[in-house]
Structures are given as C-alpha cells and as structure tokens.
Amino acid sequence: MIKLAKRMSFFSTLAAIIFMALQVVTNLYLPSLTSAIINKGVAKGNIPYIWSIGFWMIGFSFISIIASIANTFFATRESQRLGKNLRFAIYQKIENLSNDEFDKFGTASLITRTTNDVTQVQLVMQMFLRLMIMAPITLVGAIILAYLNNHQLTKIFIVVLPVMIVVVGGVIYFAVPLFKSIQKKTDRLNLVFREELTGVRVIRAFDKESYEEKRFDNVNRDYTQTAIKVNTIVALMMPMMTLIISGTNIAISWLGGHYIANKRMEVGNLVAFMTYAVQILFSFMMLTMIFILVPSAQASAERINEVLDMKSSKRSIIDKPTNKKIMFKGEKASLLFEHVYYRYLGAEKLALDDINFTATSGSMVAIIGGTGSGKTTLINLIPRFYNLEKGKILINGEDIATVPQHNLRDHVGFVPQQAVLFSGTIRENMQYGAFNATDEEIWKALEIAQAKDFISEMPHGLDSHVEQGGNNFSGGQKQRLAIARALVKKADIYVFDDSFSALDFNTDDKLRSALKKILMKPLLF
C-alpha cells in the first residue's frame, strides 16, 4: 500500500492534509464556544455576548465547511488520479508480459486487478486523506479537551474504550480473512462468467445451458454466502457501537447531572463534554471502519504489486536499450531460424526442438504438422510473442531479441488463428496497422483478401459498423477482413497462422492465387 501511495502527488496530498487538519481544529473548538455561550450568555441573559460568540461560531463553522469542501476536492482528485495511473501502469505492464507470464495470471484475474482491486485502493486512499487523518487527530484532541473540561467525567472512557477495542478487534479478526477470500472468489466468478460469454455458441451447440447455469450458480452462491457472512459481521458492529455510545451518553448525563446539582459543573461544560464524547466515539468508529477496509485494500494492493513488480525474466519481452533496427534493402527480406528451442512454462518436454530453416523474399514456406505439434508456437516466435529458450531468429541478419518490438512488428503482418476484429468501423479496423492508409489501398487489400464483394454490398461500405469481436460477420468473413488488415499494413513479412480454415475451397483458392501475385515484394509465411 505504501509503495502505491508513493505514486500520489505530494502537493495535492499535503493540501488535503492541511485542509483536513484545519477542519478538525475548528470542529474541536466549537464545543468550547458552545460552553461559553451557555454559561456566560444564556445563563446570565447577556445578549451582546451571545451575539458576539454566535458570530465567532458562524465564522468557525464557515471555515470548517470551506476546509471540508477543499479537503474533499483534493482527496477525491488525488485518489481518482491514483486509480487512473494504476490502471494505466497495469495496462502497460500487461502489454510487456510474454504469453507465458500472461497465462500465469489469466485474463479474468487481470481484469479484476485492473478494475475491482484498483477501486479498493482508490477508496482507501480517499479515506486516508479524509478519515485516517481526521479520526486520530479528533480522537486525541477531543480526549484532551474533554479532560481539561472535566477530568472526573473523562474516567468514563477508561471503561468505554476497552469495550470498543474488544468489539472492533473481534470484527477485524473474523472479517479480514473473509475479505481476502472474497477477492479470490471474485476472480473465480469473473472467470466462469467470461467463459460462458465467450463460449455461448459452444454451450448452446452441446445443449449445456442447464449445466452451465448450475456451474455459475455454484460459484455465485459461494461468493454470495461469503459476502453475506462478512457483511453480517461488519453490520453487527454498528448496533453494538450505537449501544455503547448511548450507554456512554446516559452515564455522562447521569454523572453530569449530579455534578451540576452539587455545583461542581456548569450546564455549558456538560453540553461541551457530551459533544467531545460524541466526537471521541465517532472518531473511534471511523478508525474501526478504516481498520476493516485497510486489510482488504492491502490484499488488493498486493495483487496489483504482484503484476507491477513482476521482474523481467528470460521469458519477458521487455526491450533492452539498443539502437539496432531491422533494415530492408529494396524488396529483399530473409528469415532465419538457427537452432531454435522453446519450452512452455512448467512443461517437461520441449515444444520446439532444434528448428533450423531459411526463408527469403518470393518464397512461401508452409509449416505442416499434427495437432499440438508446435506450428502456432513456431509462428508466434516471429513477432516475439514468446522469447526463445535457446537459439536465434534473424531477420535480415538481425537477431529479433536485440531489436525493439515496435521496429520488429512494424515489418510483420500477422494474421492469428482466431480472427480478431475491434468494435468500430471497417475503415478503422483496416487502418489499425496503417493509420494513413487511403480508401484506395483499403479496397485493394479487401479485393486480394476476397472481402471486397460483401463489404461493397453493405449500405455504408467502409463506414459499416463492426460489433465487438466482429460478431456481425461470419467466421470466413472475419478471417478475410483480418487478412485484408494485414495486407493494408504493407509489411515485409506476412505470417498466416491457419488463417484460411474458415474459407470454402473456391474462396481459399482465389485468395491464395491473389497472394501469389504480390509474393515478390514481401515474404509470406
């Protein structure tokens, strides 16, 4: 948590603390003015004194309001800024994770860490700038002022505070482990829900709706039961605290009444003391809520730091400082696999074992093998989605491990096994790898990819809407659009990972024939 707090602005944090301290000071001083206005004004019928102290009370109240607004502004702005920075930092870190490291966390867990966990940290940081400073200062200040007001009545807190500590300790003891459990169960809930959303067609095809409903219901029920348990424990604290506060006020009123009857205390002092008592007990309750929420946020902070602090390993794809670049002379390109070995994280056997081959411009190299033979693994090494265990991959004589990722991937047109389209328009998707691509270049690529016909028939052409994941297109159409997007990029090396699987024979044949016509410029793979 402290590590994440260092990302906050020093000046905004300091401003929030100063305004909160100002609010606390004014709030602590107001009961003294109340005592004075009752003892010296109301009791003695001194109207000018009442007006004088009344104006001071209005002034202090106004200062308290302004300080509270300013504190809320700085606390909210800084906590939201922290959340924004954390989300962006996690996003940047995820971009640099290798596929192995990405799989270690899982998509659902990374989403939870970026949203739910960051929100938890945000909430506690906002509370820190408001309550964590306000509560202890108010608690200590109110106890001192209450003691100065009447040290005999202050002895009541010797009994009350230990009782409150026992109650709070019990709540923390039982609730904190459940908060950590809830976060893990949130990950599980998101995982199952995401699987059901992405696999909805498979679920329907196998008529497994009832099975998946039971599966989700079990996870949801488990999460709900834990949430009910932890919220019940926390909820019990409020009536118990209310009972303690009410009992304290009764004790103060009873003893204070005796002191007033015996002329050992004035009415104004009793009113002020009761105000201090409320401030003491409520500040203690605020501290209690903080003690409950902080462990939950601490667990979230640990999960965030687990991602941010992941050290660069041999498998990481973080760039090393270098001035190297892949250079292409005219239309020439060469790709060399030199004694390449690769093993998946935690696997005993090698996925790729001593792979050697060379491919040059104008050639088409096909990787053939059975299911699980490592075809996709080999192809994923070219754009450096994984780092090698041993060996080298050279493009035009440069080892891709020593070249910045953006330079390497600028020269690679990659079409994945699973065609991915982004929500937006056809044009936006086509310009994903070439922002300045003209409509003429896009239509040319669509023609080669055999996608021109169905796009031109759409009412809005290139401005036609693409739903999330390209769900308004068939599997074959998505594959052709993904191929066209790679062609628009005008890369020097094209990588097709089983990208024709959803095409019928005639479309496949036409597409391959069209690709052969442009084969002399790039290297197709």
Image (cartoon, rainbow, N blue to C red):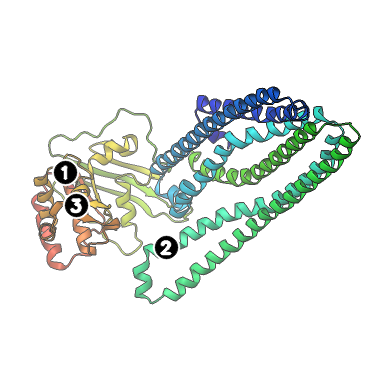
Label 1, on which residue? Answer: 490
Q: Position of residue 486 (x, y in %)?
A: 20, 49
Q: Marks 2 and 1, how far apart in space?
A: 35 Å
Q: Position of residue 480 (x, y in %)?
A: 18, 58
Residue at screen point 45% across, 71% down: 212
Please tell me how crowded label 1 is: few (under 14), some (14-19), or many (20+) other residues with Cα within 10 Å.
Answer: many
Sooner in the amino-acid sequence: mark 3 or mark 2: 2
Nearer the observer: mark 1 or 3; the answer is 3
For residue 195, the mark is: 2
Amino acid residing under circle 3: Ile
Sooner in the amino-acid sequence: mark 2 or mark 1: 2
Q: Which corner quadrant of the image does residue 222 belong to?
A: bottom right
Label 3, on which residue? Answer: 426
Secondary structure at badge 3 equals: helix
Please tell me how crowded label 3 is: few (under 14), some (14-19), or many (20+) other residues with Cα within 10 Å.
Answer: many
The answer to whether the residue labelled 3 contacts the one labelled 2, judged by CB atoms less than 8 Å apart, is no
Amino acid residing under circle 2: Glu
Nearer the observer: mark 2 or 1; the answer is 2
Q: Residue furthest right?
A: 262
114 horizontally vs 453: left or right? right
In the image, 490 versus 52, the foreground residue is 52
Amino acid residing under circle 1: Lys
Q: Marks 1 and 3, how far apart in space?
A: 18 Å
Q: Which corner quadrant of the image does residue 18 belong to?
A: top right
Nearer the observer: mark 3 or 2; the answer is 3
The answer to whether the residue labelled 1 contacts the one labelled 3, judged by CB atoms less than 8 Å apart, is no
Sooner in the amino-acid sequence: mark 1 or mark 3: 3
